[in-house]
Amino acid sequence: MEISVNGAKIFYEFPFDIPILGRLQINETLVVSWIVMILITGLCIWLTHDLKVENISKRQAFAEMLVEAADNFVVGNMGPKFKYMVPFVAALFSTSLVSNLISLTGLRSPTADLSTEAAWAIVVFTMITAQKIKTNGVGGYLKGFTTPIAVMTTFNVLSELATPISLACRHFGNILSGIVINGLIYAALAVASKALLGLIPGAVGKLLSAIPILDVGLPAILSVYFDWFTGVMQAYIFCMLTVMYIANAAEE
């Protein structure tokens, strides 16, 4: 985590010594991830509070709309037999979405850390593998690596391992690139603002050149794409790939 003291940037961590677990490092990604989980949990509690059968509130109607959308997404892409996956996919989408959009508050998005997507990808990969074993048995799953011929075994193993890697890197790369591009735009506009306004002679030019006036407006417009659109789309794509991989595993 980074703080600024008298213009100097200081980097520090929050180490906690737990005798049973050893040295546990709590960094900014972990703290913001907890904040994301608290926000989602609080929203779920608020939406599902005081549910009624008749004369439902707008809050309950909105909650039912979200549940119906999650049901349609999973059942429509995976089939009715995978309806038990709705809570998992909904949790994955909401966590990804809130993690992506939390950068709008000034916090660093947890999805800008590869370890976050890697953890999600490992969970998804485990579920894909479990589905393949459930469908074909352990023997059938292992035999699948030798198809169409035994010499392809190495390539099939690499292809299998590429699934979680591609899931993690695709999401991470798009979110991080948006953060980097936004940062570069802010820095470039600040330099341009100082250079242009510094051309004004006298104390007025000196005063205005110290204010990054060009940073107002354009970055906010670009944020609509890099934060809102990209954040929503990456959450949707990650969940879509997840349900497609698991559904395909049941057919192999």
Image (spheres, rainbow, N blue to C red):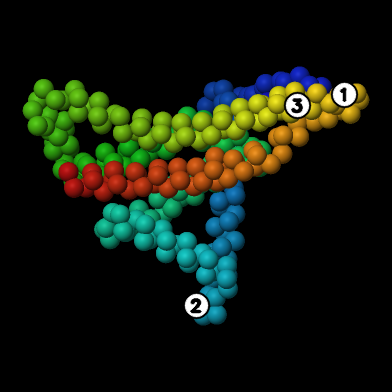
Q: Which residue is mark 3?
A: 196
Question: Which residue is tagged 2?
Answer: 53
Q: Quadrant of residue 13?
A: top right
Question: Which residue type carries mark 2?
Answer: Val
Residue located farthest toward the right when viewing the structure as drawn: 203
Task: Indicate the secondary structure of the residue bearing disc 1.
Answer: loop
Count of all numbered marks drawn on residues in the image: 3
Q: Type of residue at label 1? A: Pro
Question: Residue type at mark 3?
Answer: Leu
Q: Position of residue 90 (x, y in %)?
A: 43, 53
- Judged left or right of residue 133, residue 56 is right
- Please name the residue shown 16% across and 30% down the image: 145
In this view of the protein, can residue 225 be seen by the observer? yes
What residue sits 37% from the left and 57% below the top?
Answer: 73
Q: Nearer the viewer, mark 2 or mark 3?
A: 3
Circle 1/circle 2 CB separation < 8 Å: no
- Residue 100 is left or right of residue 251, and the answer is right
Question: Which residue bears the numbered disc 1?
Answer: 201
Toward the bottom, the furthest residue is 54
Q: Is residue 251 above or below residue 15?
A: below
The answer to which quarter of the image holds residue 147 is top left
Q: Dot 2 surroundings within 10 Å: few (below 14), some, or many (20 or more)?
A: few
Residue 249: give x, y in percent of width and height: 23, 44
Disc 3 or 1, which lies upstream in sequence?
3
Between marks 1 and 2 in the image, the one whose residue lies nearer the viewer? 1
Q: Residue at x 27, y 58 (%)?
A: 79
Q: Which of the two labelled residues, at mark 2 and mark 3, occupies the earlier sequence position?
A: 2
Report if the CB atoms under discs 2 and 3 are less than 8 Å apart: no
Q: Secondary structure at mark 3?
A: helix
Q: Please name the residue shown 56% across and 26% down the image.
A: 24
